[in-house]
Image: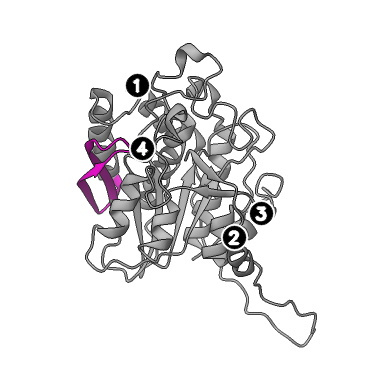
Amino acid sequence: MKNHLIIIAAALLLAACTGKPKTNDPNVNPTPKKTVTVPQFNADSAYQYVAQQTQYGPRVPLTEPHAQCAEWLTAKLGDYADTVIVQDFRSRLYDGRGIDGQNIIGVFNPEAKKRIVLCAHWDSRPFADHDPDEANTHTPIDGANDGASGVGILLECARQFKAMPLREGLGIDIVFFDLEDYGPHQEETLQYYDEEVNHWALGSQYWAKHPHVYGYKAYYGILLDMVGGANPNFPKEYYSQGYAAWVSNKVWHRAHDLGYRPYFSNELGTLISDDHLPLNQTAGIPTIDIIDLQPESSNKCFPDVWHTLNDNIEHIDRSTLGMVGDVLLHVIYEE
């Protein structure tokens, strides 16, 4: 996502600071953990899924590459999921133009009552408005990290869900959101600013109001955004801690157990307006955002390639894809 806020909300911070007390009482016998078999996440497979998306070219809505990628994503998800739903919707861009989008949804164990949402956006930015070369700032980007990386990880998770079915009673819904990254060009941010309207995350805003199942409820959700760069920094994003601290803590504890503490830090990250906000605020699903935040970068928030032509497959790191995918599979299969 491409829009970050710097206003700190005290109420969110309070909600993020709750936790269970520890005990050192030797007479307390904790319930032993059940041994669960977790499939091996294949980082090379995830990388190929990312590469395939970028091979179509920038996935800007209303373009041929966008249509071709939608067809491929629907078919590929259909290879693994019990049901695939293409949710066509109409939305309005920041400048008032109407635009059509497609959310692509894969359903696993559709009869299960306990459900978890895993999501990412599949469209890419129509403007490289943070490119260091001013001549490129109106050129569409590949969005290898910003969008395709999360989709690639979730496609590999879907492949594993097919190969090693989830336990009875647990259902997963993988949702690929469209029209996430079609907010105003950096040059026009002030012109189109409206505190009452979110010009980003249009697909997730629509899905939150009109989920693929009437009355849909989920236990929690996990959003992936910019999860394919080298040497990532995944702090606990501020809104995630405010709305769903228990989900963040669950995921980060598992990441630490798996040896990924240097990358999944316990630091509190800045507030990011991303696809998880409509899920929390409108759908009422406690949802977190696993997102690479780099406050020392050239843009002071995201990786240097963010919204530039350098956000391409050359800057995707297999080990990062593997790490995030490994954490997700452990969280899901141990649920």
Under tag 3, what secondary structure?
A: loop
Placement of 163 over or under 52, stated as above or below: below
> Given the image, on which type of amino acid does mark 4 rest?
Trp
In the image, 77 versus 314, the foreground residue is 314
Ranked by sequence position, the earlier of labels 3 and 1 is: 1
Ranked by sequence position, the earlier of labels 1 and 4 is: 1
Label 2 Cα crowd, 10 Å radius (few <14 / some 14-19 / many 20+): few
CA separation, marks 4 and 3?
27 Å
CA separation, marks 2 and 4?
30 Å
Residue 39: x %, y % from top left: 48, 51
Q: Which residue is mark 4?
A: 122
Ranked by sequence position, the earlier of labels 2 and 4 is: 2
Nearer the viewer's eye, disc 2 or disc 4?
2
CA separation, marks 3 and 2?
13 Å
Q: Residue furthest front?
A: 191
Name the chief secondary structure element in magenta.
Answer: strand
The magenta stretch is 80-105
Residue at the spot x=36%, y=21% of the render? 55
Q: Which residue is mark 2?
A: 9
Ranked by sequence position, the earlier of labels 4 and 3 is: 4
Nearer the viewer's eye, disc 3 or disc 2?
2
> Given the image, on which type of amino acid does mark 3 rest?
Leu
Q: Residue furthest top?
A: 135
Nearer the viewer's eye, disc 4 or disc 3?
3
Q: Which residue is mark 1?
A: 57
CA separation, marks 1 and 4?
12 Å
